[in-house]
Image (spheres, helix red, strand yellow):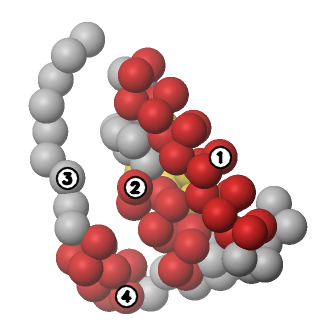
């Protein structure tokens, strides 16, 4: 199942999250989340519980790897006990 679709720049995503008023107690859901960039951004910048749904296995696997890497980096920086 190969398809191409667009992405979004982090700055533009930040504007969307600000406009939506996303906060720590909110849930961010991205259907067709690709490699999970916006899911991580919503979680890291707003503290929201973020969920990504992706049916393309390669993108899903990349998203999982990115999540693991991000958690390790936050632990190294002393910003998380994830």
The answer to whether residue 34 shows anywhere in this view is: yes
The mark that comes first in sequence, 1 or 2, is 2
In this rendering, the answer to whether 22 lies above or below 30 is below
Q: How many marks?
A: 4
Residue 16 image offset from top left, x and y in percent: 29, 78
- Between marks 1 and 4 in the image, the one whose residue lies nearer the viewer: 1
Residue that numbered label 1 is attached to:
68
Q: Quote the CA–CA distance across marks 1 and 4.
A: 26 Å
Left or right relative to 58: residue 77: right
Toward which corner of the image does residue 74 lie, by quadrant?
bottom right
The mark that comes first in sequence, 2 or 3, is 3
Point out the residue furthest to the top here: 1
Left or right relative to 34: residue 43: right
Residue that numbered label 4 is attached to:
18
Q: Residue at x 37, y 88 (%)?
A: 18
Residue 60 image offset from top left, x and y in percent: 47, 30
Q: Quote the CA–CA distance across marks 2 and 3.
A: 9 Å
Q: Quote the CA–CA distance across marks 1 and 2.
A: 13 Å
Q: Residue at x 52, y 46 (%)?
A: 66
Residue that numbered label 2 is attached to:
37
The mark that comes first in sequence, 1 or 3, is 3
Left or right relative to 12: residue 80: right
Point out the residue furthest to the right here: 81
**SS assignment at label 2:** helix
Residue 79 image offset from top left, x and y in percent: 74, 79
Residue that numbered label 3 is attached to:
7
In this rendering, the answer to whether 39 lies above or below 77 is above
Asked if labels 3 and 2 touch by Cβ distance under 8 angstroms, the answer is yes
Which image quarter is the C terminus in?
Answer: bottom right
Q: Residues within 10 Å of mark 3 (few under 14, many from 20)?
A: few
The mark that comes first in sequence, 1 or 4, is 4
């Amino acid at each position: 199942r190969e398809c191409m679709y667009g992405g979004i720049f982090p700055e533009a995503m930040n504007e969307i999250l600000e406009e939506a008023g996303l906060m720590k107690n909110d849930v961010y859901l991205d259907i067709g989340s690709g490699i999970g960039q916006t899911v991580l951004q919503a979680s890291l910048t707003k503290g929201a519980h973020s969920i990504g749904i992706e049916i393309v296995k390669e993108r899903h696997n990349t998203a999982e790897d990115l999540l693991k890497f991000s958690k390790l980096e936050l632990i190294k920086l002393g910003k998380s006990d994830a």
